[in-house]
Image (cartoon, rainbow, N blue to C red):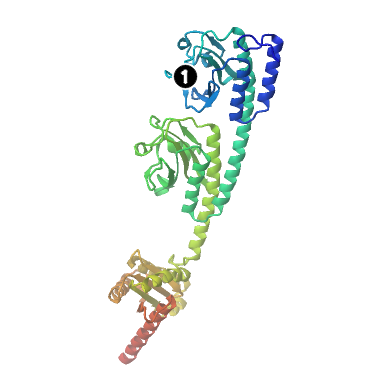
Amino acid sequence: MHSEDARGAPSSIGERYRVLLDVGRTLAGTLSSDDLYAAIHDETARVLEASGFYVSLYDQARDLATIVFFADHGRVQKIDVSYRGSDSEVIRERRAILVNEGLHGHSLLILGDRDSDVTRSAVSAPMIRHGRVLGTISAQSYRSHAYSEDDLALLQAIADIAAVAVENARYVAELEQRRREAEQIEEIGRALTGSLDAQEVLGKVIEAVLSVLDVDGASVWLCDGPSGSLGKIAASGGEIRLPVGLTWDLQGPMAEKLIELRRPIVVEDLASSTLIPEELRDTIKAGSGLGVPLVVGGQVAGVLTAGSRQPRHFAESDTAILQRLASQAAVALENARLHASLQELSLTDPLTGLPNRRHLQIHLEKEVAAARRGRNLVVILFDLDDFKQYNDSLGHLVGDDILRAFGQILHDENRAMNLVARYGGDEFVSVLSESEMDGAIHYAERVKQRMVEDLILSPHGITVSCGMAQFDRADMKSPDDIIHAADADMYRYKQTRSGRRAAST
């Protein structure tokens, strides 16, 4: 048994030394933060009166101290109390304070309220490690003159031991947090690289930022417009999401730092920052934010951002995490863009730039399905007359020019909702949705008139034959059926025209 004085504190230097050894062993073996704060309270209450007790942690960058543990009459309670560290005499002067009367004059945090006991005396000590104040511990009594100078020295010794334990617990927590972040980022990387759709990738990037970082909103904006001169919100999420599609000029210090210098930015007070373009000031609802460049294919394609509703301090680790997520996103976007390019190549005729036969088949399947439900559909098959003869006599380069010129006419005369495709060789197909035969005939006449006026086709006397077919739900079941019907109509057209020519001679 320890010999103790009337207040319960050890009475001799030897006893106090043994108490501190016990405290050290207990705290050293406690690595969970919550368990550690409770252990600091329990060990302190063994040797000092602690009717009221709290542990606060101090963030020097924000000058903010936060109560992380609070006990009243031995009952642990959850409270949400923060205060400016510079207002605390213990933190400001970096020394232990003993107060037996007049606590208000010493800027100590007073526990209790008008309906309960109010602190009459207190001992408080800073937890200092490597010259940095980590926080404070405070034992308080609801009676006057409860503590002595020896008690103050004992609490400071406990605070010194607690500082080592708090630092160790923080280190362990940071390692655990980094391990979880690494696992999350690895999992996010697999999810991102598993998607080949750019918009789906952007959505997953937003989800990842909101999942890994403690923020209220995230967005991806991409360089858009002529030569990438505009910023455009491509994806956004969270409570303070930005409107997708919002654009602004990429000018000023923010664009210079992110786009030209490729450096991250951290803005702890967005309302007063000169970095934010005027076009965005009324839209951004965040108090603080950070952004990192999104480098795709060696070029800055945009920026990945995260924001907090209230002004806050973003640590270097937050920026590092966002940069790792941006790197993952860049790889996924590059894969998606490559896939889109390959898909476009696989569906595009390289000579004319029009959709190819495969693209036509995919489009027709959708249109035929809609036609079965009652929507009008007409298909026109075009065939350049005697093209092989022109190609052989004029050369393949001129033949290619003829194909490109005719394809351009079809494209120009076509409505946005319709499709024009190169069917093969000198054959082209126009798919006219929500059209009837009269509209198709007018379209074909416009095409033929354009051919007469065209500077490439007209000098060579290039003409075209065409066949038309309207989807018939009774007789047609597939895209091939309507194509075959248009081909049969073209055959009849050519036979009729051939007969007319023979009769005229």
Q: In which quarter of the image is residue 317?
A: top right
Foreground: 358 or 404?
Answer: 358
Three-letter amino acid code at disc 1? Gly
Residue placed at 37% from the left, 84% from the top?
Answer: 494
Could one spot residue 398 in this view of the protein?
Answer: no
Residue 83 appears in view: yes
Q: Nearer the viewer, residue 267 or 412?
A: 267
- Which image quarter holds the C terminus? bottom left
Q: Looking at the picture, how far across and down is residue 133, in whole percent? A: 57, 20
The relative height of residue 315 versus residue 237 in the rendered view (above or below) is: above
Decide: is 148 above or below 263.
above
Under tag 1, what secondary structure? loop
Q: Tell how many labels.
A: 1
431 with respect to 117 (left or right): left
Counting from the top left corner in percent of width and height, residue 114 is at 42, 18
Q: Name the residue under label 1.
A: 112
Task: Indicate the position of residue 504 as horizontal and vertical percent values.
Answer: 30, 90
